[in-house]
Image (cartoon, coloured by chain):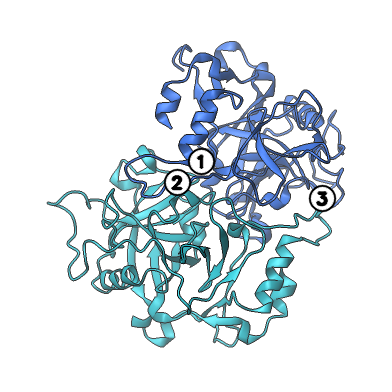
Chain colours: A cyan, B blue
């Protein structure tokens, strides 16, 4: 894989759009999230509104369930007397669980099939699935994908409560909840946390929660404070070569190359732009 | 799923064999591992020999690689001058990467297909795959599965260095390395550890390693010190009902049941025997 990346050209990479990039600062460091407005535009807008009002600052990671998700938001969200107001953000959003495929949506298919969907691949740099008969495409719950928690009603999510996948891909959630983006840096800060002792991995004692000092939209920061992150494009020959290098591992260690790969095992590399000044 | 388990009968459960059960005590608590002698009998024997000689006591968790594995053993294993001797245990073992299916091996197929293998299901309570044409069956690298590290040579594993899967199932490892069992309790103690900062997630500084106080074979402890753990049998109608309850989630929250399930998303429940005295 490193050989493939070393042979890549600048055109193989895309700079993250600062409007779609969130910096979440927690104990231990910074988590960078890329939003997916191609799939969840209303959620992305609402999350930006929340972030820009300072909604998340001082809130916390409230849930860490082993082999499932880490989740953050307002610990008092269910308590009308103590919940932080959403301000200008919407309390409910239409369920952006899938979208019409449409003629404009790029999609790079993966050849090896899938247990959960008729077809899988990559769209807008993210793991996705589609159904050509239904004409729909949706994001897939792979490791590192970020979604918007909801209650039973399909329109009860709003982005004020977010989760990230930290275990085996819970693909049964696909098309049941809105995925809004992906952690592109700092995943270990969310995956290595002590698991919550309560039901569903919620922390029972307030002091077990991990505080969020702030979340910011990169575009709202001075240029000098933005991270020059680039993601490998998923519609290039370089990406195809990377997938093939992972389908059939040729290192000396491998005795029998797999000859196939699961959607959620394909790496989606992110790097600091090589022409950027040192951070 | 809880309804299915509540309706189970005592015959749906099997008591873990103390000879195949390891207690690994680390900072924070106890990890329980069930060995898989049906698939890796030579590795299971060698691991028991190592455990009984006290080989692992005072060694450490040396590697935690995000979305991949946690690994433990001798930090000085590569250094002839400092490595702990293996004693009566063998330094090399034949590669128990797969076995002949044979007429006696139970196998409960899973209906939903697989990206990596012609057929998947459960054997001896573990996630497995098989190839009826080749006549072989092998264990699958799902979350919580434990394997024996090796160098490039296929016979260089011996069980002195063990790893557990802590992320998306790295199924490309199947048939490339010997899986020797599964963590049946305490998985969160291995999955929630800080990731190592060195290459491949190895810890660079000795003080970052997590010490192992001891590993014991349950059969070597007095009866009163053995945990009365039971695993749900995978060849029963109750297990089939559990799989179906996870293929098609019927809770109010689910808007669209998946209608399928990946091998590594099927839970393999373990409980304290209900008739056992309180620990």
User: Residue at position x 84%, y 59% from top?
Assistant: A252
Residue that label 1 marks: B188
Q: Nearer the viewer, residue B184 or B32?
A: B184
As drawn, is B77 to the left or to the right of B263? right
Marks 1 and 3, the one that precedes in the sequence: 3
Is residue B227 at all visible to an observer of this figure? no
**Which secondary structure lies at badge 1?**
helix
Q: CA distance from mark 2 to mark 1?
A: 8 Å
At which x and y percent is residue B17? Answer: 65, 19
Can you tell which mark lies on residue A194? 2
Query: Numbered disc 1: what chain?
Result: B
Q: Nearer the viewer, residue A122 or A185?
A: A122
**Which secondary structure lies at badge 3?**
loop
Q: Is circle 2 on the same chain as circle 3?
A: no
Which quadrant of the view contains residue A107?
Answer: bottom right
At which x and y percent is residue B84? Answer: 79, 39
At which x and y percent is residue B175? Answer: 77, 45
CB atoms of marks 2 and 1 within 8 Å:
yes
Q: CA distance from mark 1 to mark 3?
A: 27 Å
User: Residue at position x 43%, y 51% from top?
Assistant: A173
Query: Numbered disc 2: what chain?
Result: A
The relative height of residue B189 versus residue A264 in the rendered view (above or below) is above
Query: Numbered disc 3: what chain?
Result: B
User: Residue at position x 46%, y 12% from top?
Assistant: B277
Residue that label 3 marks: B151
**Which secondary structure lies at badge 2?**
loop
Q: Nearer the viewer, residue A9 or B238?
A: B238
The relative height of residue B52 versus residue B172 in the rendered view (above or below) is above
């Amino acid at each position: 894989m490193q050989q493939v990346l070393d042979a890549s050209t600048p055109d193989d990479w895309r700079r993250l759009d600062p409007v779609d990039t969130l910096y979440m600062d927690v104990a231990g460091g910074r988590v960078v999230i890329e939003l997916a407005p191609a799939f969840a535009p209303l959620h992305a807008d609402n999350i930006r509104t929340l972030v820009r009002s300072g909604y998340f600052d001082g809130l916390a990671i409230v849930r860490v369930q082993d082999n499932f998700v880490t989740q953050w938001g307002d610990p008092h969200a269910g308590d009308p007397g103590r919940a932080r107001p959403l301000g200008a953000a919407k309390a409910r959003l239409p369920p952006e669980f899938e979208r019409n495929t449409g003629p404009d949506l790029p999609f790079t298919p993966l050849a090896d099939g899938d247990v959960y969907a008729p077809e899988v691949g990559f769209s807008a740099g993210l793991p996705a699935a589609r159904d050509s008969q239904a004409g729909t495409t949706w994001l897939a719950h792979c490791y590192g994908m970020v979604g918007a928690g909801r209650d039973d009603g399909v329109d009860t999510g709003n982005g004020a409560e977010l989760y990230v996948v930290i275990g085996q891909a819970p693909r049964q959630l696909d098309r049941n909840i809105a995925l809004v983006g992906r952690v592109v840096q700092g995943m270990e800060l969310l995956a290595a946390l002590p698991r919550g002792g309560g039901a569903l991995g919620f922390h029972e004692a307030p002091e077990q929660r991990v505080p969020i000092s702030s979340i910011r939209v990169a575009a709202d920061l001075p240029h000098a404070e933005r991270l020059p992150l680039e993601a490998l494009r998923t519609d290039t020959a370089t990406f195809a070569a990377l997938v093939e290098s992972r389908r059939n591992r040729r290192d000396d260690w491998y005795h029998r190359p797999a000859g196939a790969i699961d959607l959620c095992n394909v790496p989606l590399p992110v790097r600091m732009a090589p022409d950027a000044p040192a951070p």
